Amino acid sequence: MNNRRTAVAAALALGLAALVTACGPDDPAPAPAAAPPAATTAAPASPAPTASAAPTATPATPTTPAPTASEAVKPCHQDPAQPETVKLDSATTGGGVTKVNLTPVSCTYKVSNEEAVAYTPTGDAASYVLAKNAVVQVIEFSGKGTKERTITPTELPTYKLASTPYFTIHRDAQGKVTAMKEIYHP
């Protein structure tokens, strides 16, 4: 009975992650928007006493943030349950146990081009055991587009990933991976 509840909870968490990923977080968008207006209000306040310096300072200030805004990066979406973003280096099965070698990564994308995603390693690779009832969701391509498919932990070592080797994972208190979801970038 507990295994069923755990599997249902993991499936609900992954569904919530998909919903949050599709909708996007509310917090990161206002923060970058708030920074440029603060700089804009600070620039006119300084040149106000000198009328001749105001036209020179005002164009220089917007010129500097403009390239930064087009090259600005944001962190990729995370679900509320705070999964870890990792790169799947390898997976093996032996003695009824599936082990995965994962490298923790941070994910960012350019605001001007959401398809320009960059992954940066944030730590050393480590080996983790997949829980027997772990939910592993991968991306498959078909003539109708992409779809998610759930595979068993024992299928992962021989499964050929269609998209990227990047996943979000959830771990239990013992450190076992209870859920893995492949990240898809168009």
Image: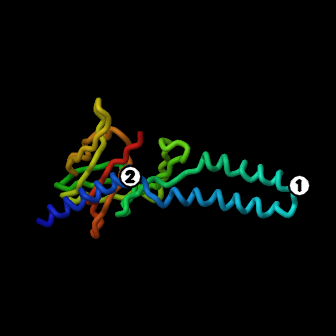
Towards the viewer: 117 or 66: 66
Q: Looking at the image, which residue is at 52% across and 42% down?
A: 113
Q: Is residue 147 left or right of residue 73?
A: left
Q: Is residue 129 visible?
A: no
Q: Looking at the image, which residue is at 48% across and 45% down?
A: 117
Question: In the picture, residue 140 is in which quadrant?
Answer: top left
Question: In the picture, residue 164 is in which quadrant?
Answer: top left
Q: Is residue 66 left or right of residue 105?
A: right
* SS for dot 1: loop
Q: Earlier in the sequence, mark 2 or mark 1?
A: 2
Tag nearer the camera, 2 or 1:
1
Question: Looking at the image, is 115 positioned above or below residue 43?
Answer: above
Q: Looking at the image, which residue is at 17% across and 55% down?
A: 95
The amino acid sitting under disc 1 is Ser
* Total numbered labels placed on residues in the image: 2
Quarter of the image for the N terminus: give it: bottom left
Quarter of the image for the C terminus: give it: top left
Task: Name the residue tied to disc 1.
Answer: 52
Task: Name the residue tied to disc 2.
Answer: 21
**Circle 2: is it few (<14), some (14-19), or many (20+) Cα within 10 Å?**
some
The amino acid sitting under disc 2 is Thr
Question: Looking at the image, is 45 positioned above or below residue 136?
Answer: below
